[in-house]
Amino acid sequence: MDTLLDLLDSEEARKAAEEFPFAACEYARALAGKSEAFRRQMLPDARELEEVDGIGPDPFGEEDEASGCFGLKQRFPDRVLVMTSNACFMNCRHCTRKGLLRHAEVVRSDEELAACVNYVQERPEVRDVLLSGGDPLVLPDDEVMRFVDAFAVLGQVDVVRLCTRAPCVNPARVTRELAARLGACGKVWANVQFNHADEVTPEAAEACGNLVRAGIPVSCQTVLLAGVNDSVETLLDLFRALQRARVRPYYVFQCDPVAGVEHFRVPLEKAKRLARECAERIGGLGLPRFVADIPGAPRKMPVELM
Ligand code: SF4
């Protein structure tokens, strides 16, 4: 048994690890040893097994999003999401897709990728392609570039979004060589996830710096998590640390209404207060938008409008 899992304080927590497997690379485990805020995102918790009325594993109907194209999801007219893997460097306990990843459709073969490219070409309004999963950077460099190049070459595509938590949970993966290859096509933007200033280590800042120096805009999508970052001071520390690493704080997401993450959710009224107080304390470039992803909504909803 993993020594970290030995630390779990109850049989229920161990059951939670059976329901949604524990996984964490060496770097993430070391960081968890130094940061309580990060450890809470990594270790299984008995509360993941609590059932909440009306909350299931797939609130956005991802499994039913009928694009008709294997491994490709489309919720909005101008962008599509391509599932490049179903693995991550760490299984975040607050993950929106925690109940879906194991049996997700993942694009692997050249034929499947060609079908995704064809889908985009048939819809000229699509200008933004999200490479997601799982984490695309669990793939070898050449595999990552196979996805990037397949879409970047299309004239209609302005942005290839690399959605990855690697700079936070496994920063050594973001080498200068990989960053240079990603930057070379001129269309890659990176969306990363840092939830606490403890995570913006020198190694993480170096990884983000590699991307920035390669000409890749880097934006952070933070998840608002009870017991991790739900205070004004903690959030401001994070936004400032991100800016020092030249990462744009972009969104703070309300935790999605997904089975197994309810204990991380911050009440809406508190989220509104945090958004308001942060706005009073930091300039616009360091201030992300506080939003919620609402099933069926046509866009991310600013919390102040809810
Ligand atoms: S890295 Fe992203 S996709 Fe992977 S477990 Fe964490 S939140 Fe989920």
Image (spheres, rainbow, N blue to C red):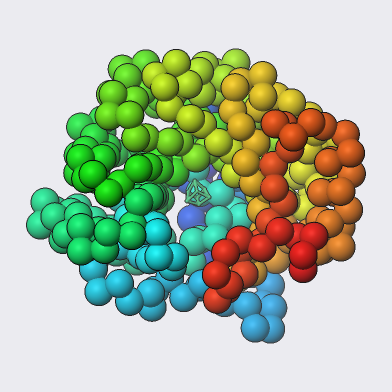
Q: Identify whether 300 is placed above or below 146.
A: below
Farthest residue to the left: give it: 111
Identify the residue shown where x is 38% and y is 78%: 64
Where is residue 159 shown, x and y percent of the image? 37, 42
Dividing the image into 4 quarters, which one contains the C terminus?
bottom right
Camera-side residue of 57 and 235: 235
Q: Position of residue 228 (x, y in %)?
A: 75, 44
Which of the pair 88/247 is nearer the observer?
247
Q: Position of residue 104 (x, y in %)?
A: 34, 64
> Above or below — where is 103 with respect to 227?
below
Residue 36 in sight here: no
Q: Is residue 139 left or right of residue 7?
A: left
Is residue 121 placed above or below 278 in the rendered structure?
below
- For the point 34% across and 25% down, which residue is it? 183
Total marks placed:
0
Horizontally, residue 180 falls left or right of residue 189, namely: left
Q: Looking at the image, which residue is at 84% across and 40% down?
A: 278
- Residue 281: horizontal and vertical position, in percent? 88, 34
- On screen, residue 217 versus residue 184, left or right, reads right
Residue at image position (71%, 59%) is 302
For residue 37, which quarter of the picture?
A: top right
Res. 289 in view: yes
Q: Is residue 24 above or below residue 53?
A: above
